[in-house]
Amino acid sequence: MFESARLKGIFFGMTATAFWGSFYPASRFIFGEELEQADPVFVAFLRSVICFLFLLPFFRQGTDRDRFRKNWKTDWKLFLIMAVTGQAESMLVFLATKYTTAARASLLANTAPIFTVVIAVLLVQESLNRWKAAGMVLGFAGITLAALSRGMDRFTDGAGAWQGDLLALSSGICWALFTVLAGRIAARDYDSGFIICVTGGLGVVLMIPMLFLLDCRMNPNLSLRAWLGLLYLGICAGSLANCCWYQALKYLQPGEAGSFGYVSAMLAVAFSTIFLGEKLSQVFLLAIPCVLGGIALMFHRGKNA
């Protein structure tokens, strides 16, 4: 049985996961029909600005600002690294969905639970019991099976190129580090909106020189559909999802929370099938029980937990 605190963590984690599950299909939808007009780095920047502006009112909470001023000598590095990894993850996702299908990008990016456990063990000495280890291996086996399967969607007649796969995998590593650091920040009792506002604001500032260094096409002349998609990605799959994620990390260990990535991958595939016409192979169908079994094992608490 799950105690009350863990149930809260699971609720917030699942809410964030539902939003993130739609992130990859929505991104693919934007780039599918507006590939030439939408520069992925510039789109990632616009999403970050929307996310930051939506949560800016939370920065006015005096208790959080006072706490930050008191602990800035130790906390500023965490906030800065989170800003860098968070922006890198977002940018890599947009780049990945430019080259590969939404389902493949999601599945490869959601190897993050594996890296989350490894980083958590190395950085914060989170315990690694046999159940987590078994769940990690089984879940990774499911992700591997899904990654080996090939498919297509309404925007391409072939599976994702290796560039997109590698970018998606890199985004998963960034998210794993972000999750572990977020767990440490959440333990400081900052409000989740304040954390996202600070890291988001830093991320926006850090991305401005990147736009020029990478010679991005800063073209805001996108279609109404693309702008509506960006608003959804910034507010729902950005601000609200991140707030729920920080709340989940107050009740769950980073390694446990990381296992929600498997659920996100399954949701992304479902959305991709429904809205993007993605074709599922028999190999991918074999991956589903592996993924769900990995989640169950990572949440199991045995005698050695």
Image (tube, rainbow, N blue to C red):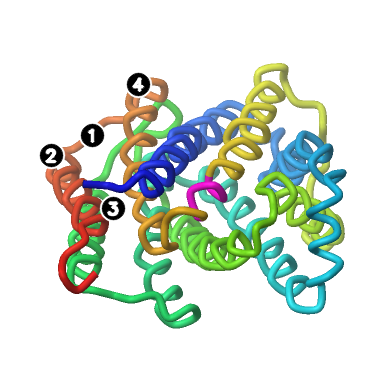
Residue 249 appears in the picture as rendered:
yes
Is 81 on the left or on the right of 294, as rendered? right
Q: Of tags 1 and 4, which is closer to the observer?
A: 4
Q: Which residue is mark 3?
A: 147
Q: Residue at x 69, y 71 (%)?
A: 78
Residue contact at pointers 2 and 3, CB within 8 angstroms: no
Q: Which residue is mark 4?
A: 274
Q: Residue at x 56, y 39 (%)?
A: 241
Q: Neighbour class for label 2 at 10 Å: few (<14), some, many (≥20)?
A: few
Q: CA distance from mark 1 to mark 3?
A: 11 Å
* Rendered location of residue 88, percent (x, y): 64, 60
> Which residue appears farthest toward the front when viewing the image?
4
Q: Which mark is residue 280?
A: 1
Kind of residue at badge 2: Gln
Task: Measure the alpha-carbon separation of dots 2 and 1.
Answer: 7 Å
Give whichever of 113, 247 is nearer the camera.
Answer: 247
Give x and y (percent) for residue 18. Answer: 44, 33
Task: Specify whether 285 is left or right of 2.
Answer: left
x then y, percent, for residue 14: 41, 38
User: Splitting the image into 4 quarters, where does residue 169 fall?
Assistant: bottom left
Give, as a single range, the part of the protein colored magenta.
Answer: 245-249
Residue that mark 2 sits on: 282
Residue at horizontal 35 percent and vertical 40 percent from the top: 158
Q: Nearer the viewer, residue 209 or 242?
A: 242
Mark 1 in CB contact with mark 3 (< 8 angstroms): no
Residue type, label 1: Leu
